[in-house]
Image (cartoon, rainbow, N blue to C red):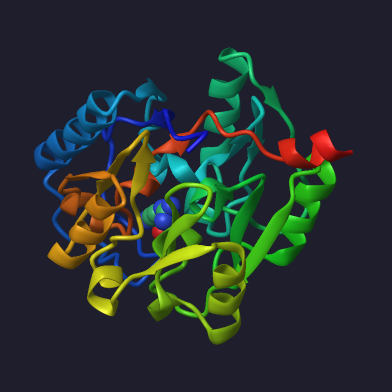
Amino acid sequence: MNWGQKYLMCPPDHFSVSYSINPWMEPGGEVDRHLAADQWLTLRSAIEDAGGSVEIIEQHPDLPDMVFTANLGIIANRILVPSRMYHRERMAEPDQAAAWATAAGLEVRRTSEGFFEGMGDALPFRAGLVAGHGQRSDQTAWSALTSATGWPITTIRLPDPRFYHIDLVFCPLDDRRALIAPLGLEAQGLKTLTSIVPEPIELTDDETLSFAANSIVVGTTIIMPACSPGLRRTLEGLGFDVVVVDVGEFEKAGGAVRCLTLPLDSNLGIALEQSA
Ligand code: ARG
């Protein structure tokens, strides 16, 4: 893949499950902060061992879900477009990302319509983004994003509240392949995805429920929260090294590996610009 080597991560110093905005969250449910910190460090090391690099944003004490940096915004071509979060509980997070991006020398470009939840709900595939709508993000926001940036976007409706971001049902592996989870899609969404991904790998329902789509690809390594023996054989057969990192404490908040990482190195619209 031509992106996925550099990520922004947020150490879980103030992580908890203190409200419920998705069906996985049980407010007041026990989160073991030490275990969460260990799991987070293991994930960071796995990224670095695979040849990737990690930059850090500090967690604001009042924003327990800020560890899920994927949702802070969309970064491509060294531009950050801060998210417009659907739930009040998370609305202050994108400003934290904007401050980080300004300090890091990125351009910050804002949109002013609709809701969208960053690269948790929009993943690069080839020159464009594949984005979810119907749960957290909406079509209005995606149109506004394209107007502001020119980035091409294909939208997919997400019908199931358990799979409220595209990164729970879709994981690009390279220019031809992606993990796709029919359990969290409608017939139309599945059709659209299989029309743009030449070689889709369909996840079983059990794999989908174990957050297998919420994985990241760093070079030829795929870092996953869980992987069934069958899926491992398929991925290894395609030449990937499969690394499983237990992020169980974060799954209590409805997020796993992809959600904990915001890619910093994607480039969108390049093919379009070249042909223009
Ligand atoms: N508790 C967070 C929320 O519901 C989890 C976010 C998971 N992020 C993701 N990219 N799927 O917003």
- Please state which of residues 108 and 272 is positioned toward the viewer in this rendering: 272
Q: Count all numbered tags in the image, as a single digit.
A: 0
Q: x%, y% of residue 3?
A: 50, 34
Q: Which residue is outermost to the right?
A: 276
Q: Which residue is outermost to the bottom?
A: 187
What residue sits 66% from the left and 65% below the top?
Answer: 155
Q: Is residue 105 in view from this perspective? A: yes
**In this picture, residue 231 sits left or right of residue 174:** left
* Quarter holding residue 74: top right
Q: x%, y% of residue 127?
A: 67, 44
Judged from the image, the quadrant occupied by ligand 1 is: bottom left
Q: x%, y% of residue 111?
A: 76, 44
Q: Is residue 28 in view from this perspective? A: no
What residue sits 72% from the left and 65% below the top?
Answer: 139
What residue sits 58% from the left and 14% below the top?
Answer: 103
Q: Is residue 179 above or below residue 204?
A: above
Q: x%, y% of residue 173?
A: 42, 50
What residue sits 53% from the left and 22% below the top?
Answer: 100
Quarter of the figure that contains the C terminus:
top right
